[in-house]
Image: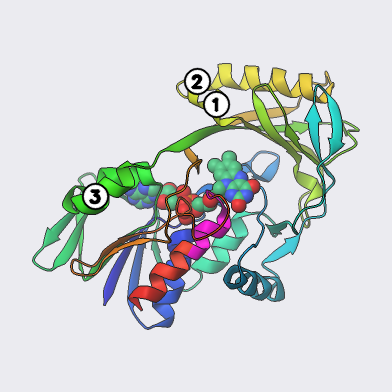
Amino acid sequence: MHIAIIGAGLAGLSCARELLAARHTVTIYEKHPDVGGRTRTCETEVGGLDFGAQYFTAQSDAFQKRVAAWRRAGWVAPWSGKLVRLEDGKAQSAGRAQQRLVGVPGMGSLAGHLALGADVRLEQRVNAIEAHGDQWLLSVEADTVPIPATAGPFDAVILAIPSDQATLLLEAAPELGAKTAAMQMAPCWSLILAFQDTLGLAYDGAWVQGGRLGWIARDASKPQRRPGEHWIAHSTPEWATEHLMEDPERAREKLLKAFHEITGSAVQPVYSAVHRWPYAQALQPLPGVFLWDEARRIGVCGDWFDCGLEGGGRIENACLSGMALGNAIA
Ligand SMILES: Cc1cc2nc3c(=O)[nH]c(=O)nc-3n(C[C@H](O)[C@H](O)[C@H](O)COP(=O)(O)OP(=O)(O)OC[C@H]3O[C@@H](n4cnc5c(N)ncnc54)[C@H](O)[C@@H]3O)c2cc1C
């Protein structure tokens, strides 16, 4: 079959690899100039930084096997940074946890490896999906082409994008659209900071209790990162929801103030920037692993399925969902 996948995040790429292994023809459409979605590495004037997903864990046997292969290939490595919980400026032990892993030399490199050999059409946004007999046509928009073009026909189409975005494209498959519409994803603001010298903090990452920020991490504490005092901070979903439409400069000022308050450091950064993620994480994941309409050959996968795990909205959910849908079709 010739199968179109919308979205080159980890779900779409995991799905594509299963389908390619089963000798299907796959074309992936990605609206960004790079693959990886929410695990992309942000290229800044101080180097590449993990501004989305920070690390991942592997609960399930299936994902543990996959991760072991990635480790052997040198695509990912353990991160043994000192992580704490910060409450009223006081650091407390974060307790024992599963092994945390990161892509090397950046989180985005994992998607880059998974995309090798796949036909990924970058900077191509899919605006609509339309049934054409028993096949599918996509309406695709690219900055380089003045009018929306049609791609296809495809024998099957897979949406590997956040649920809110999937709902907008599922007019042609309303029974799937009704299920994706029941899901809601929470936003997040990322703050990227670079300092001239070390801040001298006694930890590499912290979950923050109370306030605007929920997480901060020292990027260079991860393996194979560029040296330098680079910090990433993530807002809480509650703050991002309330300030979703905030002017980026105002958001940057407010989050930087929060960073100074929680770290107790008054040092001003030499570089700072913010990024808004409108669909960052599923707070209440959908039970199941994927959606697939066998008769019409249209499916949906992503990190917002629980995949039988505790919680959702994580890299493991995205990969398991994509792999399972690819296998089911293959
Ligand atoms: C700030 C932040 C911090 C996070 N921290 C962690 C963490 O520490 N650990 C963890 O496990 N997970 C974390 N996550 C979640 C993790 O990043 C996601 O679970 C995972 O990356 C989701 O992968 P996906 O393929 O399902 O979706 P995505 O990564 O969102 O991929 C979807 C892709 O589809 C593309 N797309 C969307 N619409 C269209 C369209 N119409 N046409 C073409 N392309 C389209 C997008 O550009 C994107 O590349 C974090 C996420 C965020 C935002």
Secondary structure beneath label 2: helix
Label 1 belongs to which residue? 238
Badge 1 crowding class, 10 Å Cα cut-off, few under 14, some 14 to 19, many 20 or more, is some
Tell me the quarter of the picture where residue 99 sits: bottom right
Q: Quadrant of the N terminus?
A: bottom left
- Magenta span: 312-320
Q: Earlier in the sequence, mark 3 or mark 1?
A: 3
Residue 170, label in figure = 3
Determine the residue positioned at 46% across, 69% down. Answer: 323
Q: Do the residues labelled 3 and 2 touch (CB within 8 Å)?
A: no
Magenta region includes residue 259 = no
Q: How far apart are marks 3 and 1 (CA)?
A: 28 Å
Residue bearing mark 2? 242
Question: Residue 201's image quarter?
Answer: top right
At x 44%, y 81%, the residue is: 21
Q: Position of residue 146 (x, y in %)?
A: 23, 44
Magenta span: predominant SS is helix
Check disc 1 and give the amino acid type: Glu
